[in-house]
Image (cartoon, helix red, strand yellow):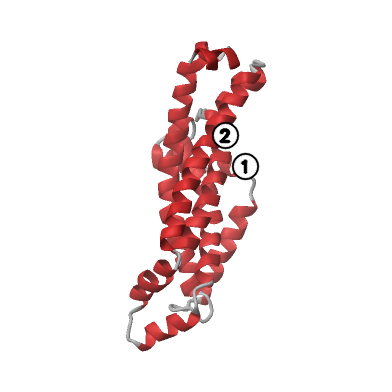
């Protein structure tokens, strides 16, 4: 540990604050990421089954979802975060702080993830879907046993991409008092000039991403056939 203190002399006095910010980042990633994964997956499936020629063809619903995703994705996250403050207050009771960041993080992640899910599901061999329909599978059975089952490697791959994006926007969430590693790096690394804290923060973020990618690559290897 003394070697680490020699490399990063400000770490000894700031390690308590660093641990607190790490916890805030993990909370944002776990809570917002889990909800965004579920909502994005559902939305991506809806996009693929309601489009023209889909299992549950519904052009009006597809166009509405398609346009809504395009509009939300085109809004810069920091502006989207401000726009969602009233919704955040209605859902979690506050528009700032750690709790107030969840709605904004979910709102910024779901459209991005849903569009990637739609792309992954579109690559499923249509012949398998037609064969499943011929065998009498219901639309729900085809969604789970064909679309989602056949797309596990692709879904894992886009989840890893979305995870890295989510880490990036958690840093912006610091501007509404959510804290986190990005906020720590800005406050101590940039505003107070403790350059060693920036490098420590970068190293921690790289480690988190590496672990997540390692797990993702393992899932892809085990599910690719």
Q: Quadrant of residue 69?
A: bottom right
Which residue does the image show at 40% across and 85% down from the upper left? 131
> Looking at the picture, how far across and down is residue 136, in whole percent?
32, 86
Q: Quadrant of residue 31?
A: top left
Which residue does the image show at 47% across and 44% down from the upper left? 212
Q: CA distance from mark 2 to mark 1?
A: 14 Å
**Label 2: few (<14), some (14–19) or many (≥20) C-alpha neighbours in 10 Å:** some
The quadrant of the picture occupied by the C terminus is bottom left
Disc 2 secondary structure class: helix
Which residue does the image show at 45% across and 17% down from the upper left? 16
Which residue does the image show at 63% across and 49% down from the upper left? 75
> Looking at the picture, how far across and down is residue 198, in whole percent?
62, 24
Looking at the image, can residue 33 be seen? Answer: yes
Considering every residue shown, the one lying at the far bottom of the view is 134
- The residue at which mark 2 appears reads as 171
- Residue 8, compared with residue 220, is above or below; it is above
| Camera-side mark, 2 or 1 | 2
- Label disc, if present, on residue 187 of the rendered structure: none
- Label disc, if present, on residue 79 of the rendered structure: 1
């Amino acid at each position: 540990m003394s070697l680490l203190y020699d490399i990063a002399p400000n770490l000894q006095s700031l390690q308590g604050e660093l641990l607190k910010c790490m916890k805030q980042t993990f909370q944002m990633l776990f809570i917002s990421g889990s909800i965004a994964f579920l909502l994005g997956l559902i939305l991506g499936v809806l996009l693929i089954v309601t489009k023209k020629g889909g299992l549950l063809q519904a052009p009006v619903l597809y166009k509405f979802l398609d346009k809504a995703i395009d509009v939300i994705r085109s809004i810069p996250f920091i502006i989207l975060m401000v726009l969602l403050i009233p919704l955040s207050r209605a859902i979690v009771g506050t528009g700032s702080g750690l709790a107030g960041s969840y709605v904004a993080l979910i709102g910024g992640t779901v459209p991005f993830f849903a569009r990637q899910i739609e792309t992954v599901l579109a690559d499923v061999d249509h012949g398998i879907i037609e064969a499943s329909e011929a065998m009498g599978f219901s639309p729900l059975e085809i969604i789970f046993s064909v679309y989602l089952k056949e797309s596990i490697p692709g879904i894992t791959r886009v989840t890893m991409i979305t995870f890295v994006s989510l880490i990036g926007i958690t840093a912006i969430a610091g501007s509404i008092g959510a804290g986190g590693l990005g906020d720590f790096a800005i406050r101590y690394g940039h505003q107070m000039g403790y350059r060693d804290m920036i490098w420590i923060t970068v190293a921690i973020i790289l480690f988190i991403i590496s672990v997540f990618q390692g797990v993702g690559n393992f899932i892809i290897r085990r599910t690719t056939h």
